Amino acid sequence: MLETRDAQKSYKLGGGAELVALDGVSVQLAPDTATALVGESGCGKSTLAKILLRLEKPTGGKIVFEGRELWGMGSAEVAAYRRQVQMIFQDPYASLNPRMKVADIVGEAFEIHKIASGEDKRRRVLELLERVGLDEGAATRYPRQFSGGQRQRIGLARALAVEPRYLIAGEPVSALDVSVQAQVLELIAQIRREKKLALLFISHDLRVVRVISDVTLVMYLGKIVEEAPTEALFGEPLHPYTRMLLAAAPIADPRRRKKVELLTGDPPSPIERPDGCPFHTRCNIVFEPCYHRVPCETILGDGRKVRCHKYE
Amino acid sequence: MNKPILSFRNLSIIFDSPDGPVPAVRDADFSVPQAGSVALVGESGCGKSVTALSAMGLVPQPGRVASGEVIFDGHDVTAMSPDALKKMRATDVAIVFQEPRSSLNPVFTVGFHLAEAIGKGAGLSKAQLAARSCELLREVGIADAERRLKAYPFELSGGLCQRVMISCAIARSPRLLIADEPTTALDVTVEAQIMGLLDRLRAERKMALLMVTHDLGLVAQHADEVVVMYAGYVVERAPVIELFDRPLHPYTTALLAAMPTGAGGQLPTPIPGNVPDPSRLGAGCPFCPRCTLADEECARTLPLLEPYDVGRYVRCFKAGIHA
């Protein structure tokens, strides 16, 4: 189990200002479970991913992996942690070293973690490439010789090289064409099932989230505002923010046209967060307590949690 | 259907490369009706953006219009003098691009961009110009317009930048707006606002919209007519409801199946293979290598874009047959 307990992350800015990216986030990533994390740009999704990957140190709270605190680990333990938790990125163009051949990109992890070398390494690299749907010839080529979808496959092969048990995917398909998006999604879903990976899938596309995840977390201005089994969330969204996100997603049916006049504006800045419930400036069911008090998390059973005064 | 404001007539666009000419658009033929909304869809590299750009005489180098015409309001854009093009771009046709932040000049304020879009020709005083700019910003849903006029693009979110771009684009009440993936870089909430705004502008100002997108959800919600492109060819053209109810071209069917609808937890169905290299197309149908219905004739002969039912056109020998 990989979890955050009341994780805080804020950045000091000039002039005494402070950007609060994570404001008390507690999430659990269970083995063999696909968790989706959704929310608008700037809500803290990527900061949470960086904290889980131990790339950023939280300013408060704990990150715990199998009972061990991430920032209390020694360097050998950190190396072991990195073998367990891997990532794939959004931009397949920026996340592969343009001067390295694919075989070296995928094989580098074998060397670093002293898993394999020489002929054994070569064989394993080819196996991985085959698993992600690339042919042998790919090994000796450079990233620029591949399309976006193929590069995303290379990134996935690199992540799988160390046989991780957790995979954190930050918007892995949002830079891709629909048809390629479907290919990469299918591959991620297959590999997750096959290797029983715990997946954290970060996305702003709710349609994609629905097909790939078991559990969905909805994040708003540094807080998880709703958590639910994915089908339950889509069937009956509880938080007004989740409802707003779902209402905004276009339905691919010209007979069911929505009359969207969503004049809800943009989310407030994480530097000047509103008092009370962070969502009250855009909420359509706002009432008195929302202006003054941050809502607590209400646990509703069946794995559902929501942070809204209406449910308290 | 209204009279067309824009018509592509057998348009072919070629990109000259060291290895010879590469056809990007082949024999494209379709129209955008006055105050209508047409969506141009297909995978990356199928020619949709170049087609849209040609309507403004903006085919990028080393591309060129090899044959055919682009008729805007009775005049052929491909044969216009630089002055006539300039006038058309200044008054009748506007464009918004995918990346709103890189479409604005980072060293100038929002107010400067709007003043430029409104133009010296309007003959407004400084105060009138500011008032008109604020009016435009309010029209696109920007509340604190006076303050935003002084802002630089880096101070604004992506959604705000795109709204500024749209306010510049509508400054002179164009009769046609070209939108190339206008919301791809934005959050769903902002996307819904921008698209709602475009719908409203279309209704209020009788402005036609030519939208390039790969999001079929947006197409379903906001287009009247759909033009599906593949490897530079228009492969299907239909009113939106007909297209979603009964796609005729196997590529359209595949595109619809590849779209994540989210419904029922079903993974979308990928289209096998990749878009072909436009310089290496065979004699037959360009979709043949990826098509489940293809036979020998498809590999040998290029089908024509032919009428099918009322208002529909399809380029396929197997049109309407479903695998």
Image (spheres, helix red, strand yellow):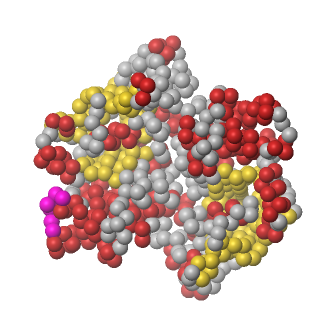
Front position in the image: A255 or B31? B31
Q: Which residues are magenta?
A: A112-117
Can the viewer see residue B4 in this picture? no
Instruction: Give above or below for A205 relative to B276.
Output: above
Query: At which x and y percent is residue A279?
Result: 49, 25
State the image quarter where residue A98 is shown: bottom left
Does the stretch in magenta take in A248?
no
Residue shown at 83% from the left, 66% from the top: B81
Q: Which secondary structure class fits the magenta region best?
A: loop
Instruction: Give above or below for A94 relative to B111.
Output: below
Can the viewer see residue B76 in this picture? yes
> Could you tell whether B168 is left or right of A28 in the image?
right
Query: At which x and y percent is residue B10?
Result: 75, 73
> Could you tell whether B214 is left or right of B173 in the image?
left
Rendered-image quadrant of the N terminus of chain B: bottom right
Residue shown at 23% from the left, 31% from the top: A62
Residue shown at 27% from the left, 36% from the top: A57
Query: At which x and y percent is residue B232?
Result: 63, 71
Front position in the image: B108 or A78? B108
State the image quarter where residue B55 is shown: bottom right
State the image quarter where residue B54 is shown: bottom right
> Could you tell whether B64 is left or right of A299 in the image?
right
Residue shown at 69% from the left, 40% from the top: B112
Front position in the image: B242 or A190? A190
Query: At which x and y percent is residue A27?
Result: 30, 34
Q: How many marks?
A: 0
